[in-house]
Image (cartoon, grey):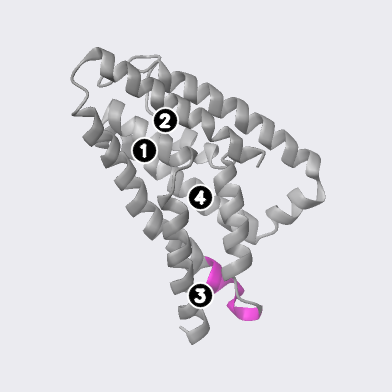
Amino acid sequence: MTHELIASFGAALVFTLAATGTPGPNNMLLTASGAQFGLKKSLPFWLGIRIGTSAMLLGVAAGLGELLNRYPNVHLVLQVVAAIYLLYLAWKISKATLGKTTAQQQPLGVIGATLFQFLNPKIWATSLASVSAFSLPGDSYWPSILLLVLAWNLTGSLMNMMWIAFGVSISKLLHSARRQQWFARGMGGLTAATVVLIFW
């Protein structure tokens, strides 16, 4: 591994640690999932995030980002769909009952979480930024992209698990139905608030 690749990977680790650790749609949903369903049942959601984010990065590196720049109407449609879906998820979270899994209340699975990344405005923005910032030219391009994907998954897995654990720990403090209701509404409100990021 060349010095340039090592330096690029190190910088990518710092960037992705900040990107995956700060609040956003994924982290709000992971916190709510941890509180409602616990760690084990939230793992498929975590795996879907990691698969979807990796696919997004590879797609951007292969030219998907340029396609969106060339056809802004496609980008607008994605923004509208993302906003509607996030508001729907926020509504479901606000109505959730902690510790109970019903046919209407299920954690987001691998496929759903994977597809959600392509509607997630924060993942679009950070994927475009990180590919632009940490990819190297020439023969080092794809090795640097693969290291970037690795950086995203190392830091992303750590931060995702921390947000799930945060939700699990909060659920243990919500002993009354009233507290659970207020928490669900609060998480739903925070998730809905991330819609602002879409049109920022």
Q: How many marks?
A: 4
Upstream in sequence: badge 2 or badge 3: 3
Residue depicted at x 60% and y 48%? 124
Considering the numbered disc 3 on the image, is that residue within a helix, a strand or a loop? Answer: helix
Question: Which residue position is annotated with label 1?
Answer: 44
Task: State the separation of the CA atoms marked 4 and 1.
Answer: 14 Å
Residue 41 in the image, given as x and y percentages of width and height: 29, 32
Which label lies toward us, 2 or 3?
A: 3
Mark 1, mark 3: which one is toward the viewer?
3
Counting residues from the start of the chain, the first of labels 4 and 2 encountered is 4
**Element marked by disc 4:** helix
Residue 30 point in image, percent of width and height: 38, 37
Give left or right: position of 124 versus 112.
Answer: right
Q: In the rendered image of this protein, does residue 81 appear above or below residue 148?
A: above
Q: Which residue is mark 3?
A: 8
Q: Nearer the viewer, residue 83 or 157?
A: 83
* Labels 1 and 3 touching (C-beta < 8 A): no
Q: Secondary structure at mark 2?
A: loop
- The span from disc 2 to disc 1 (Cα, nearest Å) is 7 Å
Q: Amino acid at mark 1?
A: Pro
Q: Which residue is mark 2?
A: 108
Mark 2 to mark 3: distance in Å?
33 Å
Q: Which residue is mark 4?
A: 53
Choose top left, top right, bottom left or bottom right for residue 13: bottom left
Give the magenta part as a residue range.
138-145
First along the sequence among labels 4 and 1: 1
Residue 101 visible at all? no
Residue 146 on image: x %, y %: 51, 66
Element at label 1? helix
Q: Residue at x 34, y 19 (%)?
A: 182
